[in-house]
Image: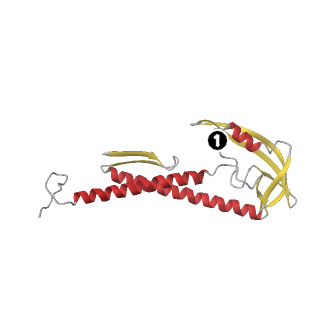
Amino acid sequence: MTAVSLRYPLGMISLRWRSNDPRLVLLVMGGLFALGGGVMLMVHVQERTRLSTAQRTWQQTQALITRSQVRSVSDRHGVMYQPDVTYVYQSGGRNYQGIALDPLSDNNYRTSSFNAVQRSLQPYQEGTTVPLYFDPQNPGQSALSLTRSTPPLSLWLGVTFFLLGLSGLLIGARWRTKRRQIVTKPGHQDAKGSPGPRD
């Protein structure tokens, strides 16, 4: 009996499953990892599309930074850090407020590196006026930069999960094929010990 217990992907789904066939376990796990990797790669493509659209169509104005600090958050991984920035700007005679460093983030990402977050906030000191980019079709949607401020985790994880899953599928399929060839050889005994067919 082979037992499998995993959280997939990234702890979003809990899965516990038992099988007598380790080859089947390998195929199922490979399929799940490949599927999860494919989903993450699709997310990455959507993010690239959003960023590309913003770079082509968003307009530039000026914003006043009203808050800029590193926020610490405690979770199961320990102390994590995230940017906490707020700015105000005008468009079409109306006042708006925003918090996004880039079009893909509302500053809700977390990292264990205090220095990394501090560096991302370095250009946006409280009380300074900085360039801002906003969607002319929806002026309330804005960002301080049109360059991605966070690592492309969806790409890295997507490629890793997909390659692991594909490897599992290939190994499992090859293992089952070899096993089937051995079982069908003349003179081979089945699982109960009885001899196979003879000429």
Image location (x, y in percent) of residue 70:
73, 38
Number of marks present in the image shown:
1
Q: Quadrant of residue 124?
A: top right
Q: Nearer the viewer, residue 163 or 63?
A: 163
Residue most toward the right? 93
Residue 45 horizontal side relative to residue 121, left or right: left
Q: Is residue 27 visible?
A: no
Image point (17%, 60%), residue name:
186
Q: Is residue 91 visible?
A: yes
Image location (x, y in percent) of residue 157:
55, 51
Q: How is the image coloured?
A: secondary structure
Image location (x, y in percent) of residue 172:
37, 55
Residue most toward the left? 199
Residue 153 horizontal side relative to residue 85, left or right: left
Image point (56%, 58%), residue name:
41
If the image is split into quadrants, where does the C terminus sit? bottom left
Give the vertical position of 40 relative to 80 (above or below).
below
Image location (x, y in percent) of residue 10:
53, 47
Quick one: SS at disc 1? loop
The amino acid marked with disc number 1 is Thr
Image point (52%, 55%), residue name:
37
If the image is split into quadrants, where does the N terminus sit? top left
Residue 164 horizontal side relative to residue 155, left or right: left
Image point (59%, 58%), residue name:
43
Q: Which residue is mark 1?
A: 111
